Image (cartoon, rainbow, N blue to C red):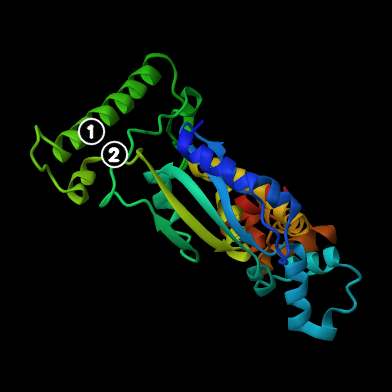
Amino acid sequence: MPLSPEAQAEIDAARATPQPTLRAVSPGMEAHLYTAQPVLDHGFVRVIDYMGDDSAIVQAARVSYGAGTKHVSNDEGLIRYLMRHWHSTPFEMCEVKFHVKLPVFVARQWIRHRTANVNEYSARYSILDREFYIPAPDHLAAQSTVNNQGRGAVLEGEEAARVLEILKSDAGRAYDSYEAMLSQDGQQGLARELARMNLPANIYTQWYWKVDLHNLFHFLRLRADAHAQYEIRVYAETMCRLVADWVPAAYAAFEDYRMGGVNLSAKGVEVVRRRLAGEEVTQETSGMSKGEWREFEGVWG
């Protein structure tokens, strides 16, 4: 379990002492509150707090649009309408705060999603634990020959063993040096804010990450995608399961229109119309570039 016994005891105590409230609650999210969901070898995601539910999205939309939404017969229909037409502010009425433990290199990808509030464990004040992300053998892959940002074939045999040994030995050696610099035979040692620079990017950090539902959906659309890097994707997939229990109607609409939907350019719409009319359309006659055509064919071929 990635949590310490002390942290688990704190969670157990919090879950054992529920408090009455007049605010809206989501039964699905209440079931997950405080509980750590393991990710990777030492990481986790857990919900610390949340605000709102599906009804909060509907409430905000009806305040905003008034009579304009009266033709929508039910809350689920309204939520799907909002998602379908890219209305964002009603989804911003819901917020969630996560406690995430993750490798530093994953955190550096994650922080690119700037519309959130973040407070990270500080290695200026505290000493980081000796915990490193070491990929499972089936996630050790060579560089892709067709995608500069992706992975290719999985490494096997002696090559896989060699790489794993390098990852483990380098991480251990760096942490040994980190400890040695912090304290040397009773002397004061190097400042923590300087000693941390020697640590590898696969060491684990932790943060609290608070975000509204609109921006969380944007994060999940990119990071839970099959093309995202595996190490951040598994965090996003874990969060998808939590969000699905928190706001089931909103997540179903998100899954349908964003995760499973397709956006077409004006040229793409025109090609579909021409094909429906029985016309043979090629890349040369479509007006699309080769890259655009390849992506179009991947969906409509």
Q: Hey, which quadrant is residue 256 in on the image?
A: bottom right
Question: Measured from the top left, where is residue 39 in percent x and y?
Answer: 53, 37
Judged from this view, the residue extending furthest toward the top is 158
Which residue is rendered at x = 85% and y = 85% of the image? 67
Q: Are marks 2 and 1 in contact (CB under 8 Å)?
A: yes
Disc 1 residue type? Ala
| Residue 187 position in % (x across, y down) | 8, 39
Q: Which of the two labelled residues, at mark 2 and mark 1, occupies the earlier sequence position?
A: 1
Whether residue 130 can be seen here = yes
Task: Give the numbered dot on residue 40.
Answer: none
Residue at 55% over, 50% down = 223
Whole-percent x and y of residue 222? 56, 53
Horizontally, residue 79 falls left or right of residue 172, namely right
157 and 243: which is toward the camera: 243
Circle 2 sits in a helix, a strand or a loop, which is it?
A: loop
Instruction: Identify residue for label 1.
Output: 174
Amino acid at dot 2 = Pro
Q: Identify which residue, 140 or 69, lies in the foreground.
A: 69
Q: In this view, does 237 lie to the left or right of 172?
A: right
Are there few (<14), some (14-19), or many (20+) residues within 10 Å of tag 2? Answer: some
Q: In this view, does 28 lie to the left or right of 166?
A: right
Mark 1 lies on a secondary structure that is: helix
Residue 187's place in the image compared with 28, above or below, is above
| Distance from Cα at disc 2 to Cα at disc 1 | 7 Å
User: Total number of numbered labels?
Assistant: 2
Provide the residue designation for mark 2.
200
Is 201 rendered above or below residue 79?
above
Query: Which of these two is toward me, 65 or 18?
Result: 18
- In the image, residue 189 above or below residue 98: above
Front-most of residues 85 and 244: 244
The residue sitting at the bottom extreme is: 67
